Image: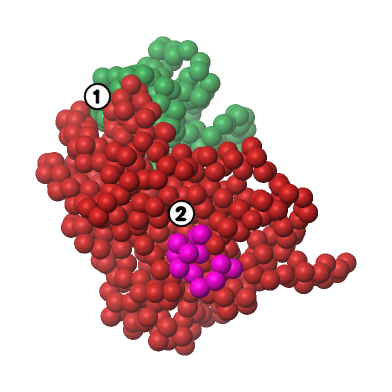
Chain colours: A red, B green
Amino acid sequence: MAVPISTAAGLDAAAIRADFPVLAEQVHGRPLVYLDNAATSQKPRAVIDALQTYYETYNANIHRGLHALSERATAEYEDARARVARFINAAHSHEVIFTRGTTEAINLVARGWGDEHVGEGDEILLTEMEHHSNLVPWQMLAQRRGASLRYIPMDAEGRIDLEAYARMFGPQTRLVTVTQMSNVLGTITPAAEIVQIAHVHGVPVLLDAAQSIPHLAVDVQDLNADFVAFSGHKMLGPTGIGVLYGRETLLDAMEPLFGGGSMIRVVQLHQSSWTELPYKLEGGTPNIAGAIGLGAAVDYLQAVGMPNVTAHELELTEYALALLSDVDGVRVFGPPDATDRGGVISFYVGDVHPHDVGTLLDAEGIAVRAGHHCAQPLMRKLGVAATARASLYLYNTAAEVDCLAAGIARAKAFFA
Amino acid sequence: MTLEDLYREVIMDHYRQPRNRGALDHANVVMEGVNPLCGDEIKLWLSIDDAGVITGASFDGHGCSISQSSASIMTAAVIGKPLADAHAVIAGFRGMMLDGAPPDEALLGDGVALEGVRKFPVRIKCAVLSWNTLKLGLDEHAAANGQHVELQHSES
């Protein structure tokens, strides 16, 4: 694979861009300016090649065949798991469960762990800025079990009130489940403190790391998190592959979500027993190519260096926040400075609806998201129905941020 | 594809100066529509007299220029129309937007200006939201009045 260039001074975005074929595309006759990375990231050649090599040279099912292709596919799949485990510094490779994505990972915990440990009158703590995928599974669990959801106080910029949070714990508190980075506000939550406070009360914590792991070095042991969920496609990997990290003891005690092939020890006519981790929680043929592609994505990110990725995005975010705040009538949501904030920038342009902003930017080749971002409760708290959102990644440049600011100014003039 | 296809002058005019915006006094049909994908919301008020004529129609809500102008155009198009004619206008508009039927200005009035939205597939839902809501409102009114409603095929 092409080794991306990175230096102590940061990363070379131009060299990195050359690794991403789609970034050379034209959209409506303009060079693509891709600023929708919080929805999904683009894929480097190394990831695309890993998928193609699997399908063209060793496509086979895993953990079954005694033939050469199956052995290689199994080895590559398990190697991808080991690489993901190292990437997040899991204590054991079998603490990494491959899922379809963050949504499946969280649902796996809500069913497999929640149905066992959450009962009548119990409480789950979360925030109003959770993505629907870290909200709806808990509503469903609460309804199944007669439990309730309690919301941790936070301000309109997504800053959690840790003192108020610490006072919320009681004998019925069973779980804390919070985002590590808001997909709307960009706010980075104090995950280590959140975990520490919960553990004082013996309560486990799930971190929704879908937006954080692609952009920040995350060490699950350092955070001391109990469950961490994330998606491959937001971190340069393919769609349809994601991860549930769980502490070994918690995963061991969990019931599988899917019964079927791969997850059994002995199957009899009327009952079966489950095999060991991680296979117990990965029933059926998994997304083998996806896992191998995610392994390649992790390699790519590690070659660039996560601190370089974070530093590059911080610099761009600071630049974007300064530039957008200079455009008359633009309101930026989330923390106004780049401290404790990722490169997810939601904004409103005067009284121009975000969809119109999205269409006008698209006409200039600029891809942003417009809508409620799967966070309707947060939209209500912010008092808007929708926002436009630009989200940055390692291959974005200051010149692209300039295009965005100019496009926003033109959109505003168009509707004036 | 150009922005002028989407943001035609007629559309921008209805967006900047919406007709029939705000609650309608003495409405006997009130219907709400939402587009869960984007959060657009529309509320419709209709006043239908005993002879089955739409004597008043208004809307409120929030959404993009396409959804709001479409609602304004729609209320203007159905006020004063007998229910059967209103159904024909709805069917004509939906046919143009969803099935590519040629625009019929005699039937749709300013509504033909929205034909260009077809070139922006993700925005078609914005344009038809208020029309789908109107159709539901009329169907509900018919059901409440014991009339037989022939439900039309709906793609969305």
Q: Nearer the viewer, residue A346 or B101?
A: A346
Q: Nearer the viewer, residue B149 or A279?
A: A279
- Relative to A242, A382 lies left or right: left
Q: Amino acid at mark 2?
A: Val
Q: In the image, what residue occupies the spot 73% across and 60% down?
A: A262
Name the quadrant containing residue A64: bottom right
Query: Which one is closest to the eye, mark 2 or mark 1?
Result: 2
| Label 2 in the same subunit as label 1 | no
Picture coordinates of residue A167 (x, y %)?
34, 84
Q: Amino acid at mark 1?
A: Asp
Magenta region: A83-94
- Eyeballing the image, is A85 above or below A150? above
Q: Which residue is mark 2?
A: A298
Q: Which residue is mark 1?
A: B13
Element type at mark 2: helix
Q: Nearer the viewer, residue A201 or A282?
A: A282
- A89 in magenta: yes
Picture coordinates of residue A233 (x, y %)?
47, 48
Q: In the image, what residue occupies the spot 67% across and 64% down?
A: A279
Q: Which mark is residue A152?
A: none
Element type at mark 1: helix
Q: Tell me, yes or no, if residue A123 can be seen here.
A: no
- Eyeballing the image, is A45 above or below A374? above
Q: Quadrant of the C terminus of chain A?
A: top left
Mark 2 is surrounded, within 10 Å at the Cα level, by few (under 14), some (14 to 19) or many (20 or more) other residues, namely many
Q: CA distance from mark 2 to mark 1?
A: 51 Å
Picture coordinates of residue A301 (x, y %)?
40, 52
